Amino acid sequence: MEGFLFQATIYLAAAVVAVPLAMRLGLGSVLGYLLAGIAIGPGLGLIGSEAEDLRHFAELGVVLMLFLIGLELEPRALWDMRERLVGLGGLQIGLTALAVAAAAMALSLPWQTALAVGLILSLSSTAIVLQTMTEKKVMHTAGGRSAFSVLLTQDIAGIPMLALLPLLATAPGAGRPAPAADHGEALGPALTWLQELPAWGVTLVTLAAVVLIVAGGHYLTRPVFRYIHAARLREINTAVSLLFVVGVAELMILVGLSPALGTFLAGVVLANSEFRHELEADIEPFKGLLLGLFFITVGAGMDFALLLERPVTVAGLALGLMALKGVVLHALARLFRLKGRDNWLFTLGLAQAGEFGFVLITFSESQRVLTLAQAQLLLLVVALSMLMTPLFFIAWEQISRRLAEAGGPGAAHDRIDDQQPVIIAGVGRFGQVVNRLVQSAGLKTTVLDNDLETIQTMRAFGFKGFFGDPTRPELLHAAGLRTAKVLVVALDDRDAAVRLVTYARRERPDLHIIARAYDRVHVYRLYRAGANDIVREMFDSSLRAGRYVLENMGFSEYEAAELERTFFRIDRAALKELAELWRPDIPIDQNQPYLERSKELNRELENALLRQIEKNRRPSDAA
């Protein structure tokens, strides 16, 4: 225990030095953690025999991360991802495995060994990719969601890979399970009893575990958390939250499933729980700490002796792997209509091998699928590819910036796959306030804006939005025009706003359209286009300023407020009447019916305000 704590202290001290430095240099926290691990491991040789135990402990950070991601997804959202989970994720694993296997056979490996290598290297790093995408605020982009779908599919695919790999053994003693000590830590106690069950028994146990998580998360957690919450002790809430996540992970290990997958499912079940935000607040600090510790152990575990002995071979294999995976990923991105920076995010983000590869390589070596030399070489290739991933994300940022500068407003738009009852087109100063109010009331919105910088700023503050031109029919329909209940048009471009209202009204006569207007003429145009509610962008704030003037000129707050309400009511009715008289083909100052009625309405407004003043002051005069 003393040695374990000493190792943890060294790891954390290295992180304190390396991570802030990496962030200052714009390299990201993940690369900082990896470099810290390299410094204290291969660099200074400070790791001891407890390092492996610490790595398994740190893997809990990946489990906590998947749980928190699950909390952000509703079951309906997960169902909406089914095309990407099965299609995009399945194709990525299959095509990558075949491509890597073909390359391995070209290097004179037997087909069984080559296929095993292909399966192992087809997986990507859930920990590094999700952490980096979260830091860079790109999880809500089309490329980010596609990458997440593939990573989730890979977590699921890791289980059948464990069953398939022993069948590919070719060495003497093939198929004979290795002693539990060789791989028991990686795969858990499931091997000691689950393999003794018949196939139908394994299936039943697995289904029972999943049902227990879903039912328990839905029916049991709420009364437990309510009971704990009544104690008003923050540390007990934290303890119960950690106990729940660790318990789900242990249950998954017992039945031979991925603990990360199990906790992700538990998070999805609790996504609508009233305790969701409390769970996030309790677990987030532990997730960040353990995930950082995991990255440090990856860096510390790299075999630099082998790298220095065969630098060209190791570096060539790592770069070749990432290039080969990149070609497959790029082709799939085009097939699934990912364009521009989303395509490059998907391609460069998933090009590395993953941390589950460490488990599969160790297991394959113990099952005589790989020789010891092959396993050591693959472990180094996996670690090196993970080390280079943050650099690939930096390259993606440069590519994305150049695409945005070159394309301007015509840069590749996001692929919209999120449909909510409220669509907000335009999220500048006006639209963002509307969006915040609506979301704070518990309603879901789909936000569209044609300004990439605005969307990126939204994402930096945790709000979801899509980059795209709301006036384009295909994007508007992708955002859910057919099923939406309310459309908010808050575009800066007055002509674009009118075009959008006109199109939306033609496509959906029953849709309630709320539009922002620049001035009176814009109000008339939007009224003719079919908007239900029209809000002049400066009108309400001007009324409030006028009310403050009245209050400071001797009117009481009540009198000023009543005058404000009277002015609003009459002016709004007058505006609708004048909209009927407005003609776009002649200037307003030459439209005599409009001018005459406008003067009449102004006199009626003045008289109404005078009557309101007399009404407000009559009781006090009588007193």
Image (cartoon, helix red, strand yellow):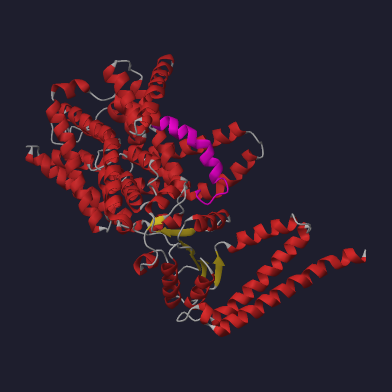
- For residue 465: magenta? no
The picture places residue 510, in percent across and down from the top left corner, at 50, 76
Classify residue 278 as left or right of residue 94.
right
Regarding residue 575, the answer to whether it shows in the image is yes
Q: Quadrant of the N terminus?
A: top left
Q: Is residue 167 above or below residue 582?
A: above
Task: Give the camera-side residue of 165 and 93.
Answer: 93
- For residue 280: magenta? yes
Q: Is residue 609 above or below residue 303?
A: below
Prevalent SS, magenta region = helix
Classify residue 413 as left or right of residue 119.
right
The stretch of residues the image draws in magenta is 270-291
The picture places residue 470, in percent across and down from the top left corner, at 40, 64
The picture places residue 387, in percent across and down from the top left corner, at 27, 32
Residue at 24% across, 50% down: 92
Residue at 50% across, 38% down: 244
Task: Give the camera-side residue of 47 and 589.
Answer: 589
The picture places residue 521, in percent across and down from the top left corner, at 51, 73
Classify residue 603 as left or right of residue 278.
right
